[in-house]
Every structure is written in structure tokens, then in C-alpha cells.
């Protein structure tokens, strides 16, 4: 994503990633500094995480629009927030923190599940601590220091809420490793629960049903392959869709786009740099074929 909602031209965007990577399970983060003077309007592509978007700019801030609501500044986007758009104008800085649903439940408690399909301000989720977090991050211009501060804040919050049941955590991990292609019945057998109980506890703790979560993970895998330049036909086959029409329907459901439009979505354009573990260059690469679009390089 270009979180400040700006063009994907690498001349305008600086991307910073933690060195070494964040050592908190299920947590990843990246910093974005944008220097473009133009107004922006960018659409979010669904990703299997709860996302904290912490606005560190000095201006009016980014405005996030979804379901007829407008939130300005720092926000928390739950799983599947719908048609979420970010708009703004001018230069800005933003820290994006991605929490997989298991980590989000441990860090945010019940608010994590309640946020599914929605967006809330960071203050709504963290209360008065939100302002202190923003002030502390703005006080330094060093991304390395910002990552250290953010990691410390998240570490202190890990024990604030009960962790999800091991059975739910296992089901989520299996969805990720299978790229969304594992059956719920099989997961229930693996954890020793009935299908009904797994369905109920998974939805209660993570905010989505196991089936919906698996579809989201599978879509994310397909989206990154499309962004890497692979054909829709090949991606449909590799990702486990019945056919290309099935892929088209899922892309429309999760992104409101066609596979062709999704392949060039700015939200995905920087993933090789900002989120290498989630990109085809990392865990989801297919054998080389055709043209692969290169993501903007970090300075």
C-alpha cells in the first residue's frame, strides 16, 4: 500500500522497514514518507490482518472513508472493512502496523473482533493512550526509533488481554500455510472440536467465520500473484479456484475490481519492499513467467 494514498511513482515515496524485523508474533510494520504535493484518492485492498494506520504528518491528515463514514488521522481497520478509501493532500508520514487476527485479539481484546468490517479511530480503540502514542512517534524523525517505540508499546499490551484458544490459533495458522485451501471439517478434526464449536469460537475471537477467513487468505495469495504479473488463468489454477470466472467473482467480492485492475492497484505496488514476507517474492512466488512488475525501491 501507499498508505498516504499517493501515486505509486517511487520518486515520491520513501519506504522504511524495521532492521531487524519485528520480533512480535503476528506483527509487521512499515513506515511511509510521501513528498508529493498533489491530492490523493486510493482504495484499500483487503488483507488478512487488522491494520493500524498511525498518521504522523503535521497537516490535516489522511481521511478514511467507508460505509458512508469519514475518519481523519490515525485509525484501526478491522478485517474486511469494505470499500475503504484514503484521501488527502500534500506530503505526509504514516506508520502502518499489520496484526494477524490472533495477534490483534491479544493486543486489542474484544475490539478486534468488533472491528471486523469496520474502521475506528485509534482513540476509540486505545483511548487517551492513542494521543501519547502519536506524540511519542512524532517526537523523532528516525524510523528506526519509531519502530523501536512501536514495538515497545505493542509488547507492553500483549499481556493486557487473554490470548485466543490454541485451537483457534492453530486453525488460523493452518489457513495461512495452506493459503486458504484447508476445509473447516478437517481443521475441526485436527483440534478435536466439533465443526460447530470451531465455527463459533473462531468467529467470536477473530471476528469472521473460518470459511470467510479462508476465502480472504486465498484471495490475498491470488492478489499478490496477479500483482507480480501472472495471468488470471494461471493464478486461478494455482490458487485453487474452480476456474477463471470463480477468481473474477472473488476479486470483485473482496476488492470491487477486475483481476486486471487489481494487478496494478497501488495498495499492492510496494509490497515487495514493505511486506516482503507477504509478496510473491517471498512466500508465494510461482515459477517465472511473463512480465513481473517491480515494486518501488526504498531509499
Image: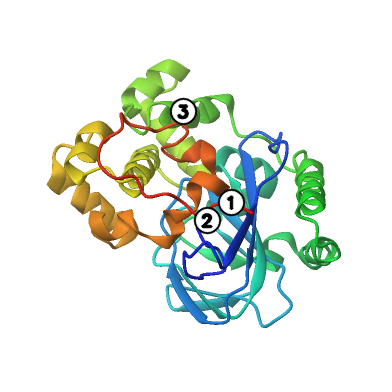
Asked if marks 1 and 2 touch (Cβ < 8 Å), the reply is yes
Q: Secondary structure at mark 3?
A: helix
In this rendering, does residue 142 appear at all? yes
Coloring basis for residues = rainbow
Above or below, 283 relative to 114: above
Q: Return the residue nearer the eye: 106 or 256.
A: 256
Q: Secondary structure at mark 2?
A: loop
Q: Secondary structure at mark 1?
A: helix
Distance between the Cα atoms at labels 3 and 2? 19 Å
Q: Going 45% across and 61% down the picture, which residue do you hit?
A: 81
Image coordinates for residue 123, horizontal then vertical, percent: 71, 67
Query: Across the whole image, how many numbered discs are drawn on residues?
Result: 3
Image coordinates for residue 143, horizontal then vertical, percent: 75, 54
Distance between the Cα atoms at labels 1 and 2? 7 Å
Asked if marks 3 and 1 touch (Cβ < 8 Å), the reply is no
Between disc 3 and disc 1, whose residue precedes? 1
| The label number, if any, that marks residue 158 in the structure image | none
Asked if marks 3 and 2 touch (Cβ < 8 Å), the reply is no
| The label number, if any, that marks residue 171 in the structure image | 3
Above or below, 21 relative to 139: above
* Residue that carries the numbered disc 2 in the rendered image: 78
Drawn side of residue 8 relative to residue 299, left or right: left
In this rendering, does residue 192 appear at all? no
* Residue that carries the numbered disc 1 in the rendered image: 112
Q: Return the residue nearer the eye: 207 or 92.
A: 92
Neighbours of disc 2 within 10 Å: few (<14), some (14-19), many (20+): many
Q: Quadrant of residue 159?
A: top right
Amino acid at each position: 500500500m501507499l498508505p498516504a494514498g499517493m501515486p505509486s511513482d517511487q520518486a515520491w515515496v520513501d519506504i522504511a522497514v524495521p532492521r531487524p524485523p519485528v520480533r512480535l508474533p503476528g506483527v509487521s510494520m512499515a513506515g511511509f514518507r510521501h513528498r508529493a504535493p498533489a491530492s490523493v484518492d486510493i482504495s484499500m485492498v483487503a488483507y488478512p490482518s487488522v491494520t493500524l494506520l498511525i498518521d504522523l504528518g503535521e497537516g490535516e491528515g489522511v481521511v478514511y472513508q467507508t460505509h458512508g463514514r469519514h475518519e481523519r488521522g490515525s485509525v484501526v481497520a478491522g478485517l474486511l472493512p469494505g470499500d475503504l478509501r484514503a484521501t488527502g493532500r500534500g506530503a505526509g508520514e504514516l506508520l502502518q502496523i499489520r496484526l494477524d487476527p490472533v495477534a490483534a485479539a491479544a493486543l486489542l481484546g474484544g475490539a478486534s473482533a468488533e472491528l471486523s468490517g469496520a474502521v475506528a479511530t485509534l482513540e476509540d480503540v486505545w483511548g487517551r493512550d492513542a494521543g501519547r502514542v502519536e506524540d511519542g512517534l512524532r517526537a523523532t524523525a528516525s524510523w528506526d526509533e519509531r519502530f523501536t517505540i512501536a514495538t515497545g508499546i505493542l509488547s507492553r499490551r500483549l499481556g493486557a488481554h487473554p490470548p485466543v484458544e490454541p485451537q483457534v490459533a492453530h486453525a488460523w495458522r493452518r489457513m495461512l500455510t495452506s493459503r486458504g485451501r484447508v476445509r473447516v471439517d478437517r481443521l475441526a478434526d485436527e483440534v478435536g472440536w466439533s465443526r460447530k464449536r470451531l465455527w463459533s469460537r473462531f468467529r467470536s475471537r477473530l471476528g469472521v467465520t473460518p470459511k470467510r477467513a479462508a476465502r480472504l487468505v486465498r484471495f490475498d495469495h491470488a492478489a499478490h500473484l496477479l500483482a507480480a504479473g501472472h495471468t488470471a488463468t494461471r493464478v486461478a489454477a494455482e490458487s485453487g479456484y474452480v476456474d477463471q470466472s470463480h477468481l473474477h467473482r472473488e476479486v470483485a467480492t473482496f476488492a470491487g475490481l477486475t483481476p486486471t485492475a487489481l494487478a496494478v492497484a497501488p495498495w499492492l505496488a510496494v509490497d515487495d519492499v514493505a511486506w516482503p514476507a507477504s509478496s510473491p517474492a517471498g512466500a508465494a512466488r510461482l515459477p517465472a513467467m511473463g512480465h513481473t512488475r517491480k515494486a518501488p525501491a526504498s531509499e
